[in-house]
Image: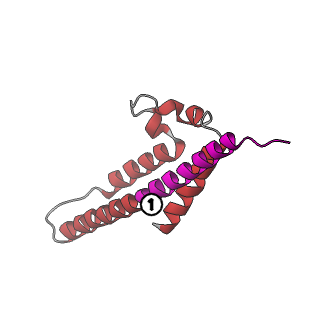
Amino acid sequence: MVVDISSLTSTATSAGLGGISGFLIGYAIKKVVRILLVLVGLVFVAFVFLEYQKLISVNWNKIQTSTIAALGNITSGQLLANSGIPGTNHIATSMTSFGIPLTGSLTAGLLLGFLRG
């Protein structure tokens, strides 16, 4: 049985680049999510403080219903499907054509980057 070195190096390169790219993407996503959560928390605290000082009146029921609707759209995947961004409906089908080494290492790197970030 003869092993072709060029196909082995191609697979190793694909897996290595996928892992590194996934790690960097996961790390960046965690940092961005952390910053966004801090900003949302500060806005929430500002609303509560301003309402306590009787400077504004906040309709908490409307905020609750719109938040629940937004989270429902995010979890059901309708946010990207209805965003109008071209090509977002075909992300899963295009990822299948990249191959197992790239997508597997990209996913593993993404998880490691997100956990380490």
Rendered position, 78 above or below 44: above
Q: Which residue is mark 1?
A: 27
Query: Which quadrant would the N terminus be assigned to in this image?
Result: top right
Q: Which residues are magenta?
A: 1-29
At a point 55% along the width and 62% down the height, the residue shown is: 112
Q: Position of residue 33 (x, y in %)?
A: 39, 59
Q: Position of residue 90 (x, y in %)?
A: 53, 30
Q: Identify which amino acid the numbered label 1 is placed on.
A: Tyr
Q: Position of residue 20 (x, y in %)?
A: 51, 55
Q: Nearer the viewer, residue 93 or 54?
A: 93
Q: Is residue 48 left or right of residue 55?
A: right
Q: Main secondary structure of the magenta part?
A: helix
- Please tell me whether residue 59 belongs to the stretch shown in magenta: no
- Please tell me whether residue 15 belongs to the stretch shown in magenta: yes
- What is the secondary structure assignment of the residue under circle 1? helix
Q: Is residue 33 left or right of residue 114?
A: left
Give the quarter of the image for residue 35.
Answer: bottom left
Give the quarter of the image for residue 27.
Answer: bottom left
Q: Residues within 10 Å of mark 1 (few under 14, many from 20)?
A: many
